[in-house]
Amino acid sequence: MSDGIKSVALVGIGGYGNSYIKELLDRATAGTVKFVAAIDPSPQGCERLSEIRDRGIPLFDSLQDFSRREKADLVILATPIHLHCEQACLAMDTGSHVLSEKPVGSHPDQIRLMIEARDRNRRQLAIGYQWSFSPAIQKLKQDIMAGRFGKPKCLRTRVYWPRDEKYYRRCPWAGRKRDADGHLILDSPANNACAHQLHNMFYVLGSAINRSDWPTSVTAELYRANAIGNYDTVALRCRTGHGASILFIASHATEQERDPVFRYEFENATVHYGQFDDCIVAEPRNGARINYGSSSVANLSRKLSDVLNSIQTAEPVVCGPEAAGAQTACIYAAQQSMPDIIDFPRDLVVVEGASDERRTYVKNLDKALDKCYEQFSLPSELAIPWSAPGTEIAAVPENAILKR
């Protein structure tokens, strides 16, 4: 469109889609985008639904219905994990660029299908890992690629974000491996709320700005306290193609909330997050501390601006399926590593609160997981009584999915 304005349609206007609704309505008011359609079979979850109607923005029940009748330069997908691949391919096959929320999909094969659809249609396909679009992560990644810190050795991340029953009841696919029709979902802390932190370890080690390092093997321990189909607590370790070792620990079943922290160790430096407020900081073995700034700059508005700019300039997006695919390959291997989720002992599980705010947590789980984080170990390796070992699984090879 003229003057750089892009027509945008949003699929999924409830839940996280509400954040996009605010952004798109504000940008439309400023004249920087044309918000041409809101798409959702159940639009009642949209907090500004009446405003959408008042502005005359068309509402559609499905992307298929929209694609038969209208077109948008950019389609944004704020939809369930198991719909990303099908919807992204449909949007690109009908002429739209795509920004899909994370993760890229639920199975590694979907990465290849989405890349093929993007390439044959000459479209842009971005995956919405916000940290990847942040100035702090981009500066850090540039320094890592330049060899400023030497070879990566081990990277670890820990995050405890407790969730109540309302979280698991918010939609029919929450906490499930598959939906009622058998479609693979793999919803979990590592594939949804905390997926950003897992993806980021692969992303910063990638050999190009739009690439990630890829897992070669994964060993995972998957546990649950909540009455769900998949896990609410994960400890996994993997090796990457460039020889780094990664440890990821996350839980929705701790008593206390603790925001993400990470420690990335290289030959010549250690990079911290969470130790120095909200800033990412590198401490070289020889040299002054480097402050990359706050990760909170990685907001939705910046992500959308970067994607719109990539569409305008035809420059590759910084986080597309090549970058996001490593997390999906890791998650898929993790589920194979422990196909039967381990239930925490009932005498350690506490249920408190009323109605949808009722919450389930495990006594002293945070202390046990803290020990794993500090010792770069899985729970079974520390002989924690409730633990069980997972099997080491070879991840789907990068060259089986991505073009080189």
Image: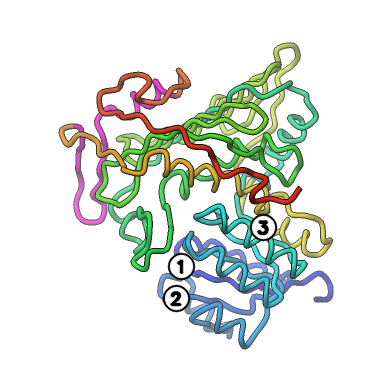
What distance separates the C-alpha of mark 2 from that of mark 1?
Answer: 7 Å
Instruction: Nearest to the eye among marks 2 and 3: give it.
Output: 3
Marking on residue 90 = none
Is 360 within the magenta?
A: yes
Check contact, mark 1 vs mark 3: CB within 8 A: no
Which sits earlier in the primary sequence, circle 1 or circle 3?
1
Query: What's drawn in magenta, residue-wise?
Result: 348-372
At label 3, counting other C-alpha atoms closer than 10 Å, the crowd grade (few under 14, some 14-19, many 20 or more) is: many
Q: Which of marks 2 and 1 is nearer the N terminus?
A: 1
Question: Is there CB contact under 8 Å for labels 2 and 1?
Answer: yes
Farthest residue in the top direction?
286
| 330 shown above or below 55 | above
Q: Which residue is label 3 attached to? A: 126
Q: Which amino acid does label 3 sit on?
A: Ala
Relative to 247, is 67 on the left or the right?
right
Q: Distance between the residues labelled 1 and 3?
A: 21 Å
* 47 and 376: which is toward the camera: 376
Residue where numbered disc 1 is placed? 14
| Apparent side of residue 192 relative to residue 390 in the rendered image (left or right) | right
The residue drawn where x is 70% and y is 19% is 289
Which mark identifies residue 43? 2
Residue at the spot 76% in from the left edge and 30% down from the top edge: 143
> Residue 258, relative to residue 41: is it above or below?
above
